[in-house]
Image (tube, grey):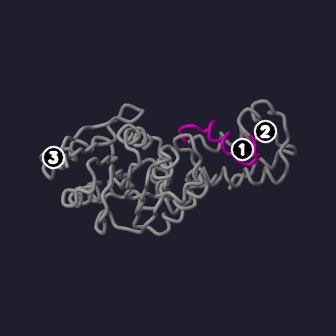
Amino acid sequence: MDDTLNDQPDPTVHGALKWAAAQLQHLPNPDLESELMLEFVAGEERLWLVTNLDHILDKSQADRYITIVNERAGGQPLSYITGQKEFYGRSFKTTPEALIPRPESEVLINQIKTIVQRKANPKILDVGTGSGCLAVTLACELPAAQLKATDISPEALKVARANAEQHKVADRILFLEQNLLLDETDHYDVIVTNLPYVEDHWLAASPQAKELAAEPRLALSGGETGLELIEEFLRQFALKRSAPVVLLEHGDEQEQILVPFAKKLLPEAHIRSVQDQFGVNRVISISINE
């Protein structure tokens, strides 16, 4: 552990940020992450940091900052250190029991809001809810919606329920331990799913391998091809047809495999790709006639 910050008799905000950035040079945004962690420790916002660079940290703040900076340098995800992650403008509780929300998934919220805008009381199913960021956000954005959120992990469902309670929508979401659509008997206006889609070999070889290892493998690994769970979900959907519209998040370029696969299962369906805010094909939208 590098605790040279304590060698400074009176560590200032400026000194702490400079020290932390040096420890995090191997990360893409060391300056930003240094600031975010000091905001967390000091309980202040960024404006306070930049206008109080000469402020002296007390010993407990300095010690805490040293600890979490070293945790981050060792590969612990920032969101697990702070226990929170922003998604669609809201803060969500994050723990190692559930996947950290990604900004790419926000495109799913926009798509669903457009699809159900003329529905009085839309019914929405979120398969593989994880932290609950999709279901909870939809409950907040669509006050008349009826939501069900499922996951195979009871630990992830606890995190999702906590997030629903935090945002005061727990009474409008049914959380249920369930494997894909196997036990599904209801019908919905939209089904949304962000299932694991990372290839096992990529998980092992990725530059972010150490950081990804901190997240639940169950929520990341899509098997050798990355598509094992998604393809099984599509097989089940083709049999049950539990909604006229499915929105399915996927990895980079996986639409090249998933679109033909879905067309074979659902030859009459209208299938299109949807880009995320970074201009990358991130979602396939499947519409079927009922």
In the rendered image, which residue does mark 2 sit on? 13
Q: Position of residue 21 (x, y in %)?
A: 65, 39
The quadrant holding residue 218 is bottom left
Type of the residue with mark 2: Val
Q: CA distance from mark 2 to mark 3?
A: 57 Å
For residue 204, say whether it is visible: no
Q: Which residue is mark 1?
A: 38
Circles 1 and 2, Cβ within 8 Å, touching? The answer is yes
**Cα–Cα gap, marks 1 and 2:** 8 Å
User: Residue at image x 22%, y 47%?
Assistant: 258
Nearest to viewer (mark 2 / mark 3): 3
- Type of the residue with mark 1: Leu
Q: Amino acid at mark 3?
A: Lys
Tell me, yes or no, whether the highlighted magenta stretch contains residue 28: yes
The numbered mark, 1 or 2, whose residue comes first in the sequence reads: 2
Q: Which residue is mark 3?
A: 263
Q: Earlier in the sequence, mark 2 or mark 3?
A: 2
For this rendering, which residue is in front, 257 or 28? Answer: 257
Q: Secondary structure at mark 1?
A: helix
In this rendering, the answer to whether 178 lies above or below 255 is below
Q: Residues within 10 Å of mark 3 (few under 14, many from 20)?
A: some
Q: Where are the magenta residues, as a range?
A: 27-44
Is residue 179 a member of the stretch shown in magenta?
A: no
Q: Secondary structure at mark 3?
A: helix
Q: Residues within 10 Å of mark 2 (few under 14, many from 20)?
A: many
Residue 53 location, quadrant = top right
Magenta segment, prevailing SS (helix, strand or loop): helix
